[in-house]
Image (tube, helix red, strand yellow):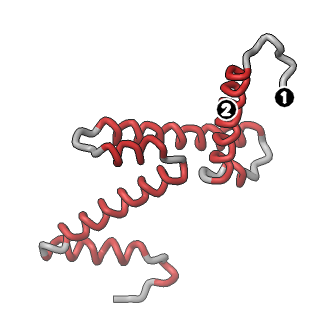
Amino acid sequence: MSNRTDFRTAELVELYDLRWQIELFFKELKSTLGFAQCRLRRFEATEGWLELVLVTFLWLEWHRARQLAKSGLTTKQKERWRHQRTHGLCLAVRRHSEQADLEYLARAMQTPGGIRRLRRKLRQAIPAEFRTAG
């Protein structure tokens, strides 16, 4: 509904569509990127939290642009990257990070020095109160 009698129906629908995208943006900030979990009381702290959430969103969009710029993507892959919402982008980044970790582990397992480094890193990853001597 609108009181704009000088707008055509198509213009009103386009404006409403833009408004809906803004609503989806705020929903994604709250549900996917955690802005709704902000429990800070000071304005400066809340402002910092919002900046962190927005930078994360922008980084995800930058990551999307980098993926779309890759040569050799199929049309289906490009479409998937274009239409991915924030949650899907987060999953893709997590999957990429996990794959890189697994590749690192596979390379490190090829040498005795790498195996020693992995054992040391795994021991360090265990909280101090749960570590055993030896």
Secondary element under disc 1, as helix, strand or loop, is loop
Three-letter amino acid code of the residue under disc 1? Met
Horizontal relation, residue 109 to residue 9: left or right:
left
Viewer-proximal residue among 27 and 53? 27
Residue 71 x %, y %: 23, 39
Q: Which residue is disc 1 drawn over?
A: 1
Q: Is residue 113 above or below residue 1?
A: below
| Residue shown at 68% from the left, 49% from the top | 30
In the rendered image, which quarter contains the C terminus?
bottom left
The dot on residue 17 is 2
Q: Residue furthest front?
A: 9
Q: Is residue 19 above or below residue 106?
A: above
Viewer-proximal residue among 32 and 130? 32
Q: Is residue 44 above or below residue 134?
A: above
Residue 38 x %, y %: 72, 50
| Residue shown at 39% from the left, 36% from the top | 65
> How many other residues sit within 10 Å of disc 1, few (<14), some (14-19) or many (≥20)?
few
Viewer-proximal residue among 2 and 108? 2
Residue 72 x %, y %: 22, 42
| Residue shown at 66% from the left, 53% from the top | 31
Horizontal relation, residue 96 to residue 10: left or right:
left
